Image (cartoon, grey):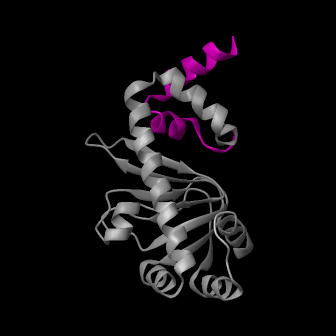
Amino acid sequence: MIEELITLINKSVNLAPQDVDLCMSQFELVQFPHSAIIEVEGKVPTYLYFIISGYVRLFYFDEKGNEITTHINCPPGFITSYFNFINQKVSAENLQSITDCTLLRISKANLGFLLEHSAVFKNYSIMVFEQALAYNENRAKEMATLSAEQRYLKLIKNYPDVLKNVPVQYIASFLGMKPESLSRIRKKILQ
C-alpha cells in the first residue's frame, strides 16, 4: 500500500532506494471504518495521514454546537490539522473518516527522523506544506469572494467524486451553507 505514496512522491522528486526504505520504515498502515473519529479535538494531533482510499474530513463545533467542515480530502492526499501537528499544539478540530478508509500515518517524531535523514524528503515535505498553505489561502479567498453557487460549481468541476462519496451535510458545511441552500442550488443547476 505504501507504493501509492512512493509513486506520488516520485512525481515531484527522485527517490533513491535508501529513501524508499527509510519511508517504508516510518509510515504505518491503518484502516478506519466510516464515521470513525481518527483525531479528536482538545488534543495535539498525533499523526500526519496519507489517504490511500476513502474520504476524510476535518471539522469543529461552533458556539451553537453545529459541525463545521473545514476540509474534505480524498486519495492521494495528506491530511491533519497542519498548524497544530507541526507546532504540537492542541487542536480544536476533529479528523473523521467519511467512508471506510485505508491510510498511512506518520508521527511527528518519525516525520522529524525522516526529514533529518533524507534531504529528498525534506524538500518534498516543504513542497507539501507550501501547497497546503496555498490551498488554505485560496479557499479563504473563495469563501469571501465567490457566491455559494460558484463554490458548488467549482467543487463539482474539480472534485466530482466528492459528490458521490460525501454526505450532503458535510459538503454544504464545507461550502459555507446550510444543506437546504445546497439542495436549492443543486435543483436549480439540474433544471
Q: Position of residue 89 (x, y in %)?
A: 28, 68
Residue 173 visible: yes
Specify whether residue 40 is painted magenta. no
Q: Position of residue 51 (x, y in %)?
A: 62, 63
Q: Main secondary structure of the magenta part?
A: helix
Near-viewer residue (56 or 17) = 17
Residue 60: x and y, percent?
A: 37, 50
- Decide if residue 189 is on the left or right side of residue 182: right
Q: Residue at x 44, y 82 (%)?
A: 112
Kindly indicate the quadrant of the structure image that contains residue 62. top left
Which residue is depicted at the point 47% across and 39% down? 174
User: Which residue shows up at 50% across the image and 29% down it?
Assistant: 179
The one of 146 and 81 positioned closer to us in this rendering: 146
Question: In which quadrant is the N terminus drawn?
Answer: bottom right
Magenta range is: 164-191
Choose between 116 and 50: the one closer to the eye.
116
Residue in view at x 45 percent, y 57 percent: 130
